[in-house]
Amino acid sequence: MVAAQARPYSSGLLSIGQVLARLQDDFGDLTPSKLRFLEEQRLITPERTASGYRKFSQEHIERLRLILTLQRDHYLPLKVIAEVLDEIDQGRDPIIPGAASRSASSILTPKRVLSSEELRRLTGASARFLGEAIAAGLLPAAEVFPHDAVAQVTSLLKLAEQGITPRHLRPLRVAAERDAELIAHAVSTRGVKPASPAATEGALELAEHLDTVRSGVLRRRFGTA
């Protein structure tokens, strides 16, 4: 992996102690020696003052947060993390191995919620259309919506243009709920602690496999497989 080139010292950079103060609430096992070890492994290259002291920029902080998250939540070895970072350094947004198609940017993107008005503005859906989607169980009956509801509503609108309305998709919702029960049972039989990161990742991975199988069935149905 090619290490980032060090830049001349500039103001606004952080010392090791300041980096620890920012990150230790989320990563309690982070220590100065661990930071130095990650530097030795060429996963991060802090800048240096004229006296040789390490200094970290906001970009370094974000890179560290990614490295530590991949270690803690995705159990990736440093060799694989180095490959992910290499992809990022080349301007790509790599899929994280074993993370159910989640990309490097998505696992660190803060979760956002949208009001009904914001969701309508971003998608062009009417209040009536959103109400129909909620009534069909395709969207949560709540005052706010997760940000990925934008993609859901956009697809629902495209389907509606072809005559497939939210009302027609009730069986899809029922089938998805059955899939969720199937996945939950499969994960529980592995002895994984419920609601743990490992359980979540396992469930997402199984959901991805189910989507692949479902897509294959549909393609064969229409003679494209």
Image (tube, helix red, strand yellow):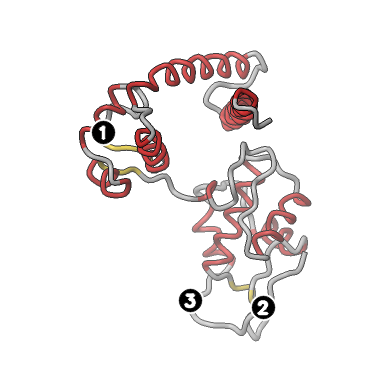
Q: Is residue 135 left or right of residue 49?
A: left
| Figure label count | 3
Q: Residue at x 38, y 19 (%)?
A: 170
Q: In front: 58, or 171?
A: 171
Residue 36 is left or right of residue 30, and the answer is right
Q: Which residue has dot 1 on it?
A: 129
For badge 1, the amino acid type reads Phe
**For the residue labelled by badge 1, is the local secondary structure a helix, a strand or a loop?**
helix
- Which-is-in-front pick, marks 1 and 3? 1
Q: Amino acid at mark 3?
A: Gly
**Residue at 27% of width from left, 27% of height from top?**
132
- Element type at marker 3? loop
Residue 19 occupies quadrant? bottom right
Q: Which mark is residue 6?
A: 2
Q: How would you rate the neighbour count of disc 2 (Cα within 10 Å): few for under 14, some for 14-19, many for 20 or more?
A: few
Residue beneath label 3, please?
12
Say which amino acid is labelled 2. Answer: Ala
Residue 9 or residue 203, whichever sits in front: 203
Image side of residue 217 versus residue 163, left or right: right
The answer to which of 90 and 52 lies nearer the viewer is 90
Instruction: Measure the alpha-carbon separation of dots 2 and 1.
Output: 53 Å
- The mark lying in front, picked from 2 and 3, is 2
**The residue tagged with tag 2: helix, strand or loop?**
loop
